[in-house]
Image: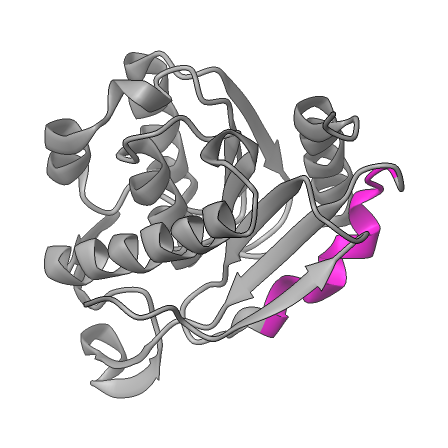
Amino acid sequence: MTTTLPAIEIETAPNPDFSIIWMHGLGADGSDFVPVVPELGLSEDVAVRFVFPHAPTIPVTINNGYVMRAWYDIVAIDGGARHADEAGIRASRDIVRKLIERENGRGVPPSRIVLAGFSQGGAIAYIAGLTHPEALAGIIALSTYIPAPALLAAEFDPANRATPVFAAHGTQDGVVPLQLGEQARQALTDLGNPLEWRTYPMAHSVCLEEITEIGAWLTARIGTRAA
């Protein structure tokens, strides 16, 4: 049975109408994107719960087996390709589904939940969001890629064919090459998802312009308090 991961939670107002589950990158933890919340510029009239889960600690093969927080193991890097542990991806997808269920139990339906993530966390946002059996409010995928294309092809759920996606990448990213982000962009285009794609002159990171545009994209999804 999948347990719910510990997480940092921030509520912008009581009784949240929307939830954003935001997954961090490899080796980081849930605190990594907490400072982004006030920078998004969301309306004070909207009650949002941000959930920043801490990934499990596992050995990561490409980092010499060092134990760190990770959403799945990366077995090898072959040029631009990542050979990811599909069992680990599935396990993290189950964790995200558990977090979604918890938000449902707190009064936030899937249609008001956004999955977000950076790097490895963004890869899980892609897989968990696009294979979820109920329509979500949106997916934010930053400096990332689709880690298991065959899994996505086999288990993509039409319930999320119309789910909007904000995807962004640094043109100077030396950790997750831009090519991988562009491959994900093409996959989303092929699936038919509404996609907002942005690139920025940065390395494997986020920038203020990007955060501002994420805030505008979120405002378009959750701009008014739900009735």
What residue sits 60% from the left and 46% below the top?
A: 19
Q: Position of residue 136 (x, y in %)?
A: 45, 31
Q: Position of residue 90 (x, y in %)?
A: 18, 54
Q: Quadrant of the C terminus?
A: top right
What residue sits 21% from the left and 68% below the top?
A: 73
What residue sits 24% from the left and 66% below the top?
A: 2
| Relative side of 128 to 208, left or right | left
Predominant SS along the magenta part: helix
Q: Which residues are magenta?
A: 31-43
Q: Position of residue 31 (x, y in %)?
A: 62, 73
> Is residue 206 in sight in this rendering?
no
Q: Quadrant of residue 71?
A: bottom left
Q: Quadrant of the N terminus?
A: bottom left
What residue sits 11% from the left and 36% below the top?
A: 150
10 shown above or below 6? above
Q: Nearer the viewer, residue 38 or 6?
A: 6
User: Is 32 covered by the magenta stretch?
Assistant: yes
Q: Nearer the viewer, residue 100 or 85?
A: 100
Q: Quadrant of residue 77?
A: bottom left
Q: Quadrant of residue 43?
A: top right
